[in-house]
Amino acid sequence: MSADLVANVVISGVLTGLVYGLMALGLSVIFGVVRVVNFAHGEMMTIAMYAAVVLFAALRLYPFLAILPVAAAFFAFGYVMQAGLINPFITRPEHSQFMLLVAVAIIMVNGLLLAFGPDAKNVQTEYQLESFALGPLLFDKGRVYAAGAALAATAALFAFFRFTLTGKAIRACADNYLGAKVVGLNVKHLYALTFGLGSACVAVAGCAMSVLLEVTPQLGPAYTLLAFVIVIVGGLGSLGGALVGGVLIGVSEAMAGLFITPSAKSMFSFGLLILVLLFRPQGLLGRKA
Amino acid sequence: MNRRAATLLAVLGVVLAALPAFAGNYLLSVATLILYLAFAGQAWNVMMGFAGQLSLGHSLYVGVAAYVAGGMFFHYGLGPWAGLWLAMLVCVLMGAAIGFLAFRFGISGVYFALLTIAFAEFTRIGFDHLGWTGGPGGMFLKVAQRDQIDLANFRGPPAMYYYAMLALAAGAFALCAWLLRSRAGYYWQAIRENEEAAQALGINTFRWKMIAVMISSAMTAVAGVFFAFYYNNLFPEQIFHISRSIEIILGPIIGGVGTLFGPILGAAVLTVLADGITELLAAFGWEIPGIKQVFYGIVLLSVIMFLPNGIWPFMAKKLRL
């Protein structure tokens, strides 16, 4: 096996991993602040992928342009979902929250099945088969753009949390729920904003992913699990951790596909998850609770 | 339990015992499925409802037990009565290993739930690559002779499976009723409500949580062996799938977590609901893939929103039981 081949597989793993990372970032942000595990996360991802496919088929809107309307729609959707559905469940036990989101996920997967059928759908653009060459190394154009979009969205989210007043308020909610309430923050509104932001992350990741993969409704549950693996490995609630976890999983999946067998690739991820949970439950970049 | 409840339970018992006399094969298969889910739900309830440890990976025990007992039968002709013990042993060891690792490292809540999913998924993919079990192509047990009863190999008509499951569900109910009133039950409830307080009172929380996991995994193993010999074909993709875990969990949550009747009522409501929706949609000619599950999801959503403690506590209050 040549070194070039391995290098190219690593590159494609890193680029895909960044998109995974952005998806997981949405989950991490939601859990870090609202303390609810979004069991419908992967299903939301597939909805975003379908949105990109539909916009492309109907309006010839390229997936990377579709990011803007889809992310805006997802933000609104996430806000409404948190405000209407999840906020009343904040104080309920975990299994109750789990049930709620599983029910939402069931409706989403099967709603997609109802609307689009079980067959795979995809977007076909000119740049999907092209690549940038750097010596013997090849960078798929689609993957490079997707990774670029993921990085840009992550940077925007970082900036939002770091430099805006609302971002600071959300971080205050995450640090101390009661304290945030005492100083007069509208916690429910901030929770809804957070869920909206997390959903927007998923929207960007979904549009980017639609360029790399065909979408079927059944992809949803698999992505939910993948997002869990990534955030736990990186550290639940840690923004940088989600990205690192995504890249780590992306590369390890690509390597497992090359060296072992593609069907065993997620076994590798779950093995990693088990090890991290046992020996460093706060995740690679997470802080100790 | 007051007299009204005892009477109701007696009536239910008589109706269930007499069911095969007047029910057709379809109705019997629905009833068997309900009892299977009630039994598995009861097993899950020991861990979550009693001891407060949320497992989202019970498909692990169903699948491993089904494959152990099924594999022994398939390869060596070993009947399920011997395979059952082996399956239970393997599952208890796995449950103990997972519990030991998780509780030793202080993993709880969401993290524990995700760990259980991880183990189930890890095993699912592992079985996909295991030659002994047929890998992704599945394992097929010899189909039952429907007209004669072969108890040694657990082969027979639908009524035999029904009675076996009825006995198991009744046994699980009795076991859980006894556990809940035993010392262990009180320790578990103390741990569920406040682990630190329980520890401060001198309860060895690690030990009692381990016992809950082991009892729960042993009971689920029995469900898995039944699954193998009832359905006769096993695919890792199906039996270890997270939807199988969710299927087990939904009953107790919908019925009422931590209650004795919750898992039974929840299993009955959900199964009748799923079949009812199928029939109704067929009657209207709306047989589009996915539509059934969408309705199902909407009903789940409504129940969890409006009856957060489950149907049983609400019903028990209304019926003054």
Image (tube, helix red, strand yellow):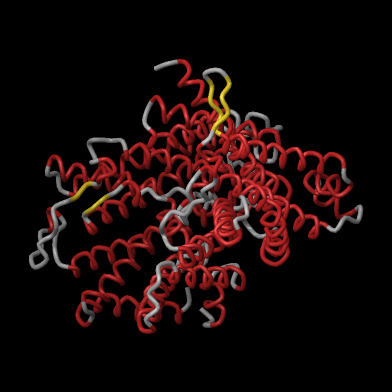
Q: Position of residue B26 (x, y in %)?
A: 25, 75
**Vertical relation: A64 (above or below) A97:** above
Is residue A40 visible in the rendered image? The answer is no
Q: Position of residue B208 (x, y in %)?
A: 50, 44
The residue closer to the viewer here, A267 or B165, is A267
- From the viewer's perspective, tell me whether residue B239 is left or right of residue B190: left
Q: Residue furthest right?
A: A183
Residue drawn at point x = 19 percent, y = 80 percent: B21
Residue A150 appears in which quarter of the rendering? top right
Is residue B135 visible in the rendered image? The answer is yes
**Count of residue discs:** 0
**Vertical relation: B315 (above or below) A117:** below
The residue closer to the viewer here, B246 or B309, is B246
Q: Position of residue B274 (x, y in %)?
A: 40, 72
- From the viewer's perspective, tell me whether residue B152 is left or right of residue B138: left
**Vertical relation: B280 (above or below) A276:** below
Residue drawn at point x = 75 percent, y = 52 percent: A194
The residue closer to the viewer here, B193 or A159, is A159
- From the viewer's perspective, tell me whether residue B183 is left or right of residue A280: left
Q: Position of residue B204 (x, y in %)?
A: 55, 39
Residue drawn at point x = 61 percent, y = 41 percent: B202
